[in-house]
Every structure is written in C-alpha cells, then in structure tokens.
Image (cartoon, helix red, strand yellow):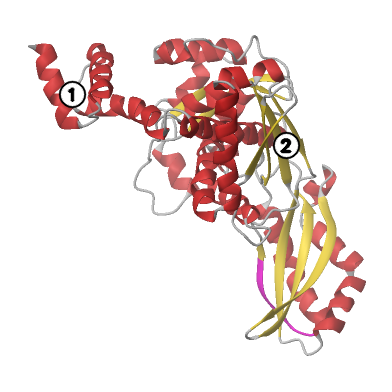
C-alpha cells in the first residue's frame, strides 16, 4: 500500500465532529483537498446525466450515507475507510473494534493471485470422457485464443493461467463444463472473462463434438481469496470472561446454520459497505462469500476465533474477494473515485485487504455486543437519532431527546414528540 497518509487513523471523538470538521480531518489524514469531497454532496455527486449512462431507464439517484471508519491499521498502514450503509452502528462498531487491534499490530492480510473463472457449458456430447481429454490436449490453443481477446490484460501481466474441464452429471445428462482460469490483475474481471468465454465457445464445441450453451463467469471466486487476521486486546474487550463468551457465541455460528446466517450478515454489513462505497459489485462479493461459507457442505460461519497465549482474542477469515480498481462503476462514479482516493489503495489486492479487515472488525463488534450488553442497546442508541429527527428535533435538541429516548427504553416517534413538546415548554 502507499504510505502517504499525513497522520494516524486514530481520531478520538470523531463522531462528535460536525460534517465539515470531519471532512477537514479526513483531508488532512489522506492528503486530499477538501474539494474532493464535493462528490459526496447530494447535489453534486452522481448527476442524472451520469446515472443515465450507467444503467437503463434512469429516473433518479438514490442516496446512501457515507461514513468514515477510523482506527484501522491494515498491514502496517493507517487507513480511513469510507463505508456506504443505511444501518446505524455499523461504522461506529467497526471503528471501535479496529481500535482494539492497534496495540497488537492491527490487521494482517494475504492473498492468492487475482484469478477469476468463466464457465462454458457444452451439450450433446456422445463421449464426455474422451471429449474432456481432447479439450485438455488443446489447452495451448484455447489459452492463446482467449488471451487474444484482451491483449492489454496480457500486457500488464494477466491472462489465462489454466484450463479445467469438468464432467457434471444432471437429470438431463452429463454436461462437459470448461473453466477458463484467468488472472485479471486489478480488475474485478467479469467483463474480461465473459469476453474470453464468448470467443472460445465455438471452438470448444468443435473440439468436444457438441454445442456450447452458457458462457459466463462464476461468482464462486474460490481461486481469488483474501485472508485477514486480527488480534483484539482482551482487556479492551472487557476481560477474560467476555472473551470466553465471545468464543462461545462465535462457535455456535460455526456449528449451526441458523446462527451462521445472522453471524455472516454482520460480517457483510462491513464488507458490503466498503464494496458499495468504492463502486464495486456488492452482489458478486456477497455471492462468493456465502458460497464459500457452504464450501464444506454445511453453511457455516465465515470467521473463526481463538485465544492466543496472552489471552487476547484472535479472529481470522478467508473469503473470495473479487473487487477491482479498473473498469465498472469504480472508474466512472465520482463518489466511488473519491472513496478510493481516501483509502489510498493502489491495487485491487490492497482494496480487498481493507475490505476484509472491516468485515472482521464488524463481526467482532457484533460478537462483543452479544456477549455483553446485547445487540439492541447499541442499535437503539443510534436509531434514536433517526427517531428524534423524524419527530422534528432541531440539531441543538437531538442529543437531549436521544438521551431521554434511550433512558426511557421507548425509542418511538410518538414518545419523541412528547419529549420535544416537554422540552420546548
């Protein structure tokens, strides 16, 4: 990662700043001009004419709050993380648990090569076993034909790395399925591998003695993995008893698919927020992550937790992370480009590392809340701000109304209206 940040991502009291002061702080840390953040203004971000070129039948633009997660130290580099989410507590929770890793080295990551796969389905083949071998004998020809579709990718070090041929039995017969395994470098890779699949499909049909049908990437990106490890300080978490309870909460998600679904949703709260902020494909990342969670035949937790010799909580996670900095909305969406600039990442691998760190921090935050005060208290405290504003509270009244809503245990609009009338009287 680049190392041009002016100072630490540890910003005490950041949540209490005004929006303008937060922007000034982010500008100082990231080394960007404050004017860059105008792309995050509702009136000057993604404009209608830009949106009209991105998708079809455009009628408007939907705004999503972008918050900055602080305290992240990823592979030795301080980073401020833009997160696009509508859910209260996500940004604050991730920031808080990231703080608890700083003294133990922050988050450490590693990756495989950025390999994506396209599948070509071949039908009407009378000798599937022999067809498989004929296709493998033609690996060099197939690879060259695929690479010729994207000479720029080959020029920067990418291209086809392997040809895999699988026989897939079904109720309608045995399909021969060819996988193009492609190093897509700093792209997400969907367009590149789909183009290659379309180009080689007719020739594959000739070699196999059948006809091609589907020619498309698989979002089960299990050859493009990112791994993250974080050590959470036991004392900051609340002590040994809290750590033990967090371990039991995490282990239930490993063993029970019903718990795993919610456990993993919490992980994706963090991951999807960063993927969305940077203009990447949230659905592709989510599909790959959830399919990986069921790779052993049982849907299970995406993360694992242990205790080290010092009694600290160690969280680890390994997931497909097909994100890119080249092509797609990342290259055209003004708000996404600003988010990438704030992150200061230079490669897709660096972006994936930050995303995974946020996912693990968010997961640890949820486990800690469950093991201590319960998940609702933090959610309700932040939700109360929305309720107060909905009831008509002015900026100088919000904090007082929120405090009363939470202390009364009645975070409802009608109660907020009553409190406002009482305050103003």
In reply to whether residue 237 is colored magenta, the answer given is: no
* Nearer to us in this view, 236 or 65: 236
Q: In the image, 305: left or right of 425?
A: right
Q: Residue furthest front?
A: 241
How would you classify the magenta stretch by its main secondary structure? strand
Identify the residue at horizontal 59%, vertical 29% (top origin): 243
Q: Is residue 336 visible?
A: no
* Nearer to us in this view, 399 or 36: 399
* Nearer to us in this view, 104 or 327: 104
List the residue tagged with mark 1. 392
Identify the residue at horizontal 78%, vertical 47% (top origin): 153
Identify the residue at horizontal 71%, vertical 57% (top origin): 193
Q: Is residue 177 visible?
A: yes
Q: Are marks 1 and 2 in contact (CB under 8 Å)?
A: no
Badge 1 or badge 2: first in the primary sequence: 2
Q: Quadrant of the C terminus?
A: top left
**Residue 334: percent from left, percent from top:** 52, 32
Q: Residues within 10 Å of mark 2 (few under 14, many from 20)?
A: many
Q: Residues within 10 Å of mark 1 (few under 14, many from 20)?
A: some
Q: Is residue 406 above or below residue 210?
A: above
List the residue tagged with mark 2. 349
Magenta residues, as a range?
Answer: 209-215
Q: In the image, 225: left or right of 18?
A: right
Q: Secondary structure at mark 2?
A: helix
**Residue 419: percent from left, percent from top:** 15, 20
Residue 402 sits in quarter: top left
């Amino acid at each position: 990662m680049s190392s041009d940040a002016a100072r630490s991502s540890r910003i005490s009291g950041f949540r209490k700043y005004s929006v303008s002061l937060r922007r000034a702080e982010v500008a100082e840390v990231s080394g960007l001009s404050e004017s860059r953040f105008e792309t995050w203004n509702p009136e000057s971000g993604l404009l209608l004419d830009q949106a009209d070129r991105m998708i079809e039948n455009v009628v408007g633009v939907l705004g999503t709050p972008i918050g900055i997660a602080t305290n992240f130290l990823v592979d030795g580099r301080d980073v401020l993380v833009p997160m696009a989410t509508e859910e209260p507590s996500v940004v604050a929770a991730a920031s808080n648990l990231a703080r608890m890793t700083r003294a133990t080295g922050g988050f450490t990551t590693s990756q495989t090569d950025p390999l994506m796969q396209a599948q070509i389905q071949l039908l009407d083949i009378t000798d599937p076993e022999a067809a498989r071998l004929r296709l493998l004998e033609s690996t060099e020809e197939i690879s060259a034909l695929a690479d010729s579709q994207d000479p720029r990718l080959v020029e920067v070090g990418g291209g086809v790395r392997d040809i895999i041929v699988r026989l897939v039995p079904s109720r309608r017969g045995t399909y021969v399925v060819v996988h193009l395994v492609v190093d897509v470098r700093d792209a997400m890779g969907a367009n590149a591998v789909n183009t290659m699949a379309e180009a080689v499909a007719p020739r594959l049909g000739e070699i196999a003695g059948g006809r091609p049908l589907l020619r498309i990437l698989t979002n089960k990106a299990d050859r493009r993995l990112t791994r993250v490890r974080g050590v959470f300080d036991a004392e900051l978490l609340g002590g040994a008893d809290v750590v033990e309870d967090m371990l039991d909460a995490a282990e239930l998600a490993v063993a029970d698919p019903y718990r795993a679904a919610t456990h993993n949703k919490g992980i994706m709260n963090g991951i999807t927020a960063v993927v969305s902020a940077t203009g990447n494909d949230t659905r592709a990342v989510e599909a790959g992550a959830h399919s990986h969670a069921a790779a052993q035949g049982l849907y299970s937790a995406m993360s694992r937790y242990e205790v080290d010799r010092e009694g600290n909580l160690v969280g680890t996670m390994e997931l497909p992370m097909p994100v890119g900095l080249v092509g797609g909305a990342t290259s055209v969406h003004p708000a996404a480009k600003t988010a990438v600039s704030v992150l200061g990442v230079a490669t897709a691998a660096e972006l994936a590392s930050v995303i995974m760190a946020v996912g693990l921090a968010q997961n640890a935050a949820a486990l800690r809340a469950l093991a201590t005060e319960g998940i609702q208290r933090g959610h309700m405290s932040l939700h109360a701000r929305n309720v107060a504003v909905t009831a008509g509270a002015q900026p100088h009244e919000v904090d007082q109304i929120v405090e009363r809503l939470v202390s009364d245990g009645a975070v409802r609009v009608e109660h907020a209206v009553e409190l406002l009338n009482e305050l103003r009287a």
